[in-house]
Image: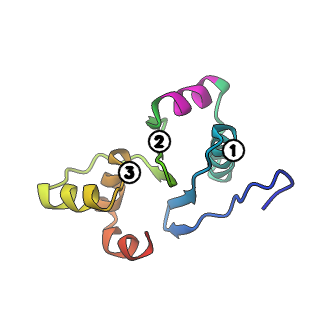
Amino acid sequence: MNSLGINTTAKIVIEELEVYDAFEDDNKNIRVIDKSLKKRGYILSSAQRVEILRQREITIDKFSISITDKNLWITPQSSVSMDKKFKELCRVNKIPKKNRAYLKENNLLGKIIPLL
């Protein structure tokens, strides 16, 4: 929690996957994303911030970022192929498309579903 009343603590952290509660205010969402990426040594440009808010699901440099109704998802970018069964499990559990490959690559789906 910081001075603006924004909870910048991830509710799920497994390896390099971070899931935060999403805010209705996009300014708060981008601050949380910005802070997470800074911890990983990556600084967002203002154009990248605008693009994240515009697209909601995006890969920037080597990070996949998704803003859903309830969560902010941040994972390293991955391009592992996924089978239909895995994709369906992710869809049912509302895991964003951009972040699924990282979960598959690191075998994290079983660890994260109970936490959602």
Query: From the viewer's perspective, is 26 left or right of 112?
Result: right
Q: Is residue 51 magenta?
A: yes
Of the two numbered discs 1 and 3 on the same chain, state the one appearing first in sequence. Answer: 1
Name the chief secondary structure element in magenta.
helix
The residue that label 2 is drawn on is 62
Q: Which residues are magenta?
A: 47-54
The residue sitting at 40% across, 70% down in the picture is 112
Q: Which residue is located at x 23 percent, y 62 percent?
A: 89
Q: Secondary structure at mark 2?
A: loop
Q: Are dots 1 and 3 in contact, CB under 8 Å?
A: no
Q: Nearer the viewer, mark 3 or mark 2?
A: 3
Give the percent coordinates (x, y) of residue 88.
Answer: 19, 57
Q: CA distance from mark 3 to mark 2?
A: 12 Å
- What amino acid is found at the position of numbered circle 3 in the picture? Asn
Q: Amino acid at mark 2?
A: Lys
| Sequence-wise first label, 1 or 2 | 1
Which one is in front, 51 or 22? 22
Residue 27 in magenta?
Answer: no
Q: Residue furthest right?
A: 3
Q: Is residue 87 left or right of residue 96?
A: left
Q: Work out whether 108 lies above or below 61.
A: below
Give neighbour class at mark 3: few <14, some 14-19, many 20+ (Cα, 10 Å): many
Residue at image mark 1: 28
Nearer to us of marks 1 and 3 is 1
Question: Which residue sits at x=69%, y=44%?
Answer: 28
Please state which of the two labelled residues, at mark 1 or mark 2, is closer to the viewer.
1
Q: Secondary structure at mark 3?
A: helix
Element assignment for label 1: helix
Where is residue 80 shown, x and y percent of the image?
A: 25, 51
